[in-house]
Image (spheres, rainbow, N blue to C red):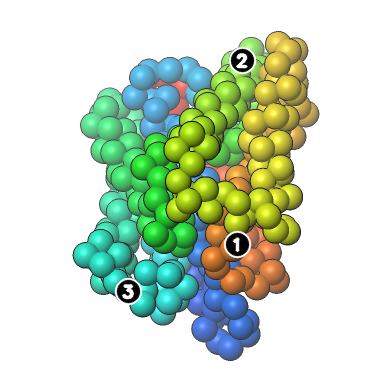
């Protein structure tokens, strides 16, 4: 099994091959609708950055939450580079955005690509420094966690404002930045739940008390973030409803009046709030691996449905390409998780700073 694990060089090589494959599909004349890459990036951008951010937060506050999973979360940092590589492929597709015909000081091709690529690369470099210094055996440096979280907030805010909100231009929401970096942390906790599913049994044999406690941590965090997400979602909806401005109401009514956006709205409300809240309400459920892993998968599914809900009215897409891109990146994420011991070999510091 050790031979199937990626080295750091093999990981980066595979990332380049994956990015080249997606680029070939996008621009090799294999698909007609080009929006699938943008949809994929808005989904995985939150998951990958959020997973590393969860590890940064727990390390910064000296928390023992999900400490047994910190190595796996930090080992995802090479995928931050994949986000930058795939985003660079969007340059010829900026015509998808309605502002492309009427550029402004903020929304124009060079500045749009420049600021977003810069934020993605800075997030990768900060995540790499965080992971390497955390695993080197040297005393943990808080500044690396702070730097990563700062670039994470910047990158996720741009994801909300630039990648998603500007697709509905000129509609605006000043809450999108806070909403999306909070949602990314929620997605990172859901990744922790899936990682717990992969590593629960072997770690129960070596450290049963710690592993059981960290499983309960994941359940508690999923439960808490479902309430936080619902509060932010309701706050945004309440402002739109109360103000009743035509340009704001149109964003909601356009999506609720047609298929499949109307159904997607129910799906992400169920996946991101209703089921996590109800299923994990009891204390016993939070310590049940089946409940926690199933809820984690549902949260990620709800996140995907929400991305589709926001972008589908404005962005054309190819269903086959969308499934293929997400499947390839998901397999890559599983490979990186499986290879975490080789990517970050030192483990003595992971449970204790």
- In the depicted view, which residue is nearer to us: 232 or 216? 232
Question: What residue is drawn where x is 73% and y is 59%?
Answer: 259
- Give the labeled residue for mark 1: 312
Q: Quadrant of the C terminus?
A: top left
Determine contact: label 2, label 3, CB under 8 Å.
Answer: no
Q: Residues within 10 Å of mark 1 (few under 14, many from 20)?
A: some
Q: Residues within 10 Å of mark 2 (few under 14, many from 20)?
A: some
Question: What residue is drawn where x is 31% and y is 33%?
Answer: 145
Mark 1 lies on a secondary structure that is: loop
- In the depicted view, which residue is nearer to us: 275 or 204? 275
- Give the labeled residue for mark 3: 102
Residue 316 sits in quarter? bottom right
Q: Which mark is residue 90?
A: none
**In the image, which is nearer the foreground, mark 3 or mark 1?**
3
Distance between the alpha carbons at the discs numbered 2 and 3: 54 Å
Distance between the alpha carbons at the discs numbered 3 and 1: 21 Å
Question: What residue is drawn where x is 64% and y is 66%?
Answer: 322
Which x, y percent locates residue 109?
30, 72
Reply above or below: 302 against 90: above
Q: Is residue 83 left or right of residue 154?
A: right
Which x, y percent locates residue 111?
25, 66
Residue 152 sits in quarter? top left
Question: What residue is drawn where x is 62% and y is 82%?
Answer: 31
- In the depicted view, which residue is nearer to us: 256 or 285? 256
Reply above or below: 124 against 210: below
Which x, y percent locates residue 290?
78, 29
Q: Which mark is residue 213?
A: 2
Which x, y percent locates residue 289?
74, 26
């Amino acid at each position: 099994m050790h031979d199937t694990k990626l080295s750091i060089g093999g990981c980066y090589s595979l990332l380049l091959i994956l990015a080249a494959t997606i680029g070939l599909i996008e621009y090799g004349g294999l698909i007609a609708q080009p929006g699938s890459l943008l949809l994929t990036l808005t989904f995985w951008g939150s998951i990958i950055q959020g997973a590393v951010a969860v590890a940064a937060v727990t390390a910064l506050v000296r928390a023992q939450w999900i400490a047994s999973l910190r190595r796996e979360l930090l080992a995802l940092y090479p995928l931050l580079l994949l986000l930058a590589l795939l985003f660079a492929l969007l340059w010829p597709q900026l015509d998808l955005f309605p502002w492309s015909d009427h550029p402004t000081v903020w929304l124009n091709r060079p500045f749009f690509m420049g600021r977003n690529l810069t934020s993605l690369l800075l997030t990768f470099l900060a995540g790499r420094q965080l992971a390497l210094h955390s695993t080197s055996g040297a005393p943990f440096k808080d500044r690396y966690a702070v730097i990563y979280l700062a670039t994470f907030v910047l990158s996720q805010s741009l994801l909300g404002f630039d990648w998603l909100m500007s697709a509905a231009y000129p509609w605006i929401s000043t809450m999108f930045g806070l909403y999306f970096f909070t949602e990314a942390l929620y997605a990172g906790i859901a990744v922790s739940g899936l990682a717990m599913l992969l590593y629960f049994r072997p770690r129960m044999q070596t450290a049963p008390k710690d592993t059981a406690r960290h499983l309960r941590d994941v359940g508690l965090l999923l439960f808490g973030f479902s309430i936080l997400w619902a509060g932010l979602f309701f706050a945004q909806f309440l402002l739109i409803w109360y103000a009743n401005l035509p340009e704001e109401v149109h964003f909601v009514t356009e999506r609720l009046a047609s298929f499949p956006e109307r159904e997607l709205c129910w799906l992400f409300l169920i996946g991101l709030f209703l089921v996590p809240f109800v299923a994990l309400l009891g204390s016993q459920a939070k310590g049940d691996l089946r409940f926690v892993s199933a809820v984690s998968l549902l949260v990620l599914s709800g996140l995907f449905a929400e991305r589709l809900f926001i972008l589908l009215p404005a962005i054309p897409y190819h269903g086959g390409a969308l499934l293929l891109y997400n499947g390839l990146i998901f397999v890559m994420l599983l490979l990186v998780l499986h290879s975490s011991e080789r990517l970050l070999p030192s483990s003595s510091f992971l449970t204790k700073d």
